[in-house]
Amino acid sequence: MTPKEKALKILSADRFAVSSGIELTEAAAGYAVCSLRITENHFNAGGAVQGGAIFTLADTAFAMAANNQGNLTVSVSNSISYLKGTKGHTLYATAKLKSASKRLSNYEVEVTDNLDQLIATMTVTGYITGKQHSE
């Protein structure tokens, strides 16, 4: 199974991400891009895209990048910085592996929009459990 096929299988089992509208665009070892088409359900009371929607998109991209090789990896620490609101209609989260040891991995995630604006950045520390995702 390719990394993208593996990531698609994992994403299809993530009911929260799927119900939020998140889709997988690209995947390779330690890398993934996910997208979210913004709908009225993603806005907060202030009329901006809800921070939780942006966080979920970024965390899902991390999960797809960290898990697409078969080892179950979970986030143990996430730090997100919201840089600006979006006027676009689609958000993209790009997750890239920066370092890994036997049990810990570090990823950087950038969230941009279809207007090429940087909306948020996230750093994630993942714990590699040593368990395999089921085929």
Image (cartoon, helix red, strand yellow):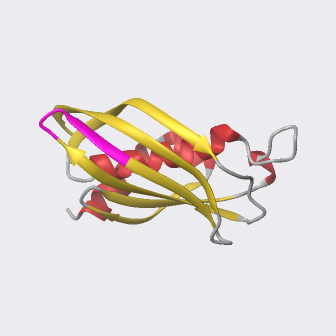
Q: Residue at x 20, y 52 (%)?
A: 69
The residue at 12%/36% (across/down) is: 102
- Taking 41 as reference, is 118 above or below it? below
Nearest the viewer among 89 and 81 is 81
Q: Position of residue 33 (x, y in %)?
A: 44, 62
- Residue 134 showing in the rendered view: no
Evaluate whether residue 52 shows in this view: yes
Left or right, 47 with reference to 121 = right
Q: Residue at x 73, y 65 (%)?
A: 89
- Horizontal side of 86 relative to 36 (left or right) equals right
Farthest-out residue, left: 102
Quarter of the image where one finds residue 95: bottom left
Residue 47, position as x, y percentages in the image: 87, 46
Query: Which range is magenta?
Result: 101-107
Give left or right: position of 95 versus 6: right
- The image shows residue 6 at horizontal and vertical percentages of 28, 56
Residue in view at x 45 percent, y 51 percent: 109
